[in-house]
Image: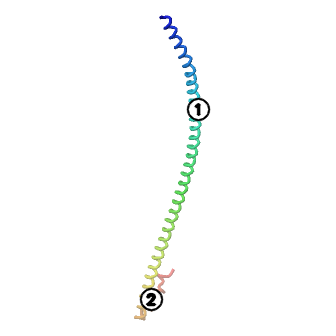
Amino acid sequence: MEGNVRRIMNEIINTLLVSLIPAVITSIISYLVANKKANTQMLALQESNKHEIEKLMKQHEVDIESLKEQYQLEADKSEREHQHKIEIMKMEHEHALESKEKEQSDAAMFGVLADIIKEPSKLEDLMNLANNPMFKE
């Protein structure tokens, strides 16, 4: 009986081995194929991402350069406007000084003329003063 049980066990083990070996081999081959396919897809995806990142970096550099140029143009424009305002203020100041000097000169002239009209003898004093050798060069 023991020989019979042993024979039956050997037949069961042989049957199981015949069933399991092809299944295990198929599973290993499927795993290797799936692994290779996944690695290929990952490499393709990495390459694609690498190109996208390079493209974005180049665009970023272009954008930064554009912003620098725009800032420089705005700074130049602001500097020109500032210089223009300074020139206008300087001209207005000079004009105001000239105007004030003219007012004072006119006031002095009219004061002298008013004095001469009131007292004609002062015209003679003014003429003597003009002929004074001290005022002549």
Q: Is residue 69 above or below residue 43?
A: below
Please tell me whether mark 1 or mark 2 is closer to you in this view. Answer: 1
Q: Residues within 10 Å of mark 1 (few under 14, many from 20)?
A: few
Image label count = 2
Q: Of helix, strand and loop, which one carries label 1?
A: helix
The foreground one among 59 and 34 is 34
Disc 1 to disc 2, how far (Cα)? 117 Å
Q: Position of residue 82 (x, y in %)?
A: 49, 65
Q: Position of residue 8 (x, y in %)?
A: 51, 10
Q: Is residue 1 above or below residue 103?
A: above
The foreground one among 45 and 106 is 45
User: Which residue in the protein does label 1 denote?
Assistant: 37
Q: Is residue 103 above or below residue 10?
A: below
Q: Residues within 10 Å of mark 2 (few under 14, many from 20)?
A: few
Question: Residue at the location (44% across, 88% down)?
Answer: 110
Q: Which amino acid is tagged 2?
A: Leu
Which comes before the other along the chain, label 1 or label 2?
A: 1
State which quadrant residue 111 falls in.
bottom left
Question: Residue at the location (46% across, 81% down)?
Answer: 102
Question: Residue at the location (49% across, 71% down)?
Answer: 88
State which quadrant residue 129 falls in.
bottom left
The foreground one among 51 and 98 is 51
Q: Of helix, strand and loop, which one carries label 2?
A: helix
The foreground one among 117 and 3 is 3
- In contact (CB < 8 Å): disc 1 and disc 2: no
Give left or right: position of 89 versus 56: left
User: Which residue in the protein does label 2 denote?
Assistant: 126
Q: Position of residue 76 (x, y in %)?
A: 53, 60
Q: Which amino acid is tagged 1?
A: Lys
Question: Residue at the location (53% across, 62% down)?
Answer: 77
